[in-house]
């Protein structure tokens, strides 16, 4: 895997309702491990931002900006939270993702590089530069 820019990596946590099938002691243990993981990454300067997301919200779509209910909490694909990491390579971001304490309970972690700019903006900038040349 090629290294990307220094814009960081986003960990997206999916399937975050797995705690519903666990005992309160199991949830307490996982959350203790999770908090230690978060604190370690913060202390190492690798954590830029992080937050859980509520299960409710709205989706805006279409040319008119139509608003509908969503995301839907029952979906295993719903994003339940994120970490924004400041690490130099995808490999390091993947190693951090593999340390997620809730993986054995069914949570999945999507690792994505943060782009230096929106692809459409990049395309517009390149077209403008080409027209000026």
Image (cartoon, grey):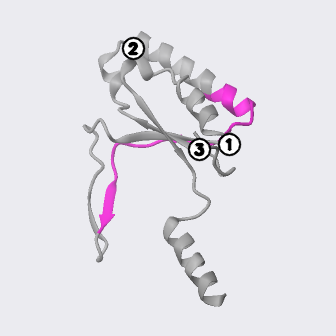
Q: For residue 20, which numbered disc appears in the image?
A: none
At 32% from the left edge and 64% from the top edge, which residue is drawn?
Answer: 60
The image position of residue 88, as x and y in percent, is: 69, 41
Residue at the location (62% across, 21% down)?
36
Q: Which is more foreground, mark 1 or mark 2?
A: 1
Residue that badge 2 annotates: 24
Q: In what element is the residue under mark 3? A: strand
Closest to the observer: 2 or 106? 2
Q: Residues within 10 Å of mark 1 (few under 14, many from 20)?
A: some
N-term mark: 1 or 2: 2
Between 25 and 97, the residue placed more toward the observer is 97
CA gap, disc 3 to disc 1?
7 Å
The residue tagged with tag 1: helix, strand or loop? loop
Vertical placement of residue 7 versus 38, above or below: below
Q: Can you say whether 108 is above or below 82 in the image?
A: above
What separation in Å lies between label 2 and label 3 (alpha carbons)?
32 Å
Q: Give the Cα distance between marks 1 and 2.
A: 33 Å
Q: Is residue 114 left or right of residue 66?
A: right
Which comes before the other along the chain, label 2 or label 3? 3
Pointer 1: what residue?
A: 86
Quick one: quadrant of the C terminus?
bottom right
From the viewer's perspective, is 96 left or right of 109? Answer: right
Q: What stretch of residues is rendered in magenta? A: 38-61
Say if the magenta span includes residue 22: no
x and y percentages locating residue 75 in the rendered image: 26, 39
Q: Position of residue 118 (x, y in %)?
A: 53, 65
Asked whether residue 54 is drawn in magenta, I would say: yes
Q: Which residue is mark 3?
A: 9
Q: Nearer the viewer, residue 133 or 93?
A: 133
């Amino acid at each position: 895997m090629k290294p990307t820019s220094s814009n960081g990596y986003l960990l997206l946590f999916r399937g975050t309702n797995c705690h519903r099938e666990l005992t309160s002691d199991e949830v307490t243990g996982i959350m203790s491990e999770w908090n230690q993981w978060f604190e370690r990454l913060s202390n190492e300067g690798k954590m830029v931002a992080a937050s859980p997301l509520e299960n409710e919200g709205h989706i805006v779509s279409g040319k008119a900006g139509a608003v509908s209910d969503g995301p839907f909490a029952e979906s295993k694909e719903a994003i339940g939270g994120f970490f924004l990491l400041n690490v130099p390579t995808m490999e390091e971001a993947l190693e951090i993702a593999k340390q997620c304490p809730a993986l054995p309970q069914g949570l999945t972690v999507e690792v994505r590089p943060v782009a230096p700019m929106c692809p459409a903006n990049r395309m517009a900038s390149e077209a403008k530069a080409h027209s000026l040349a």
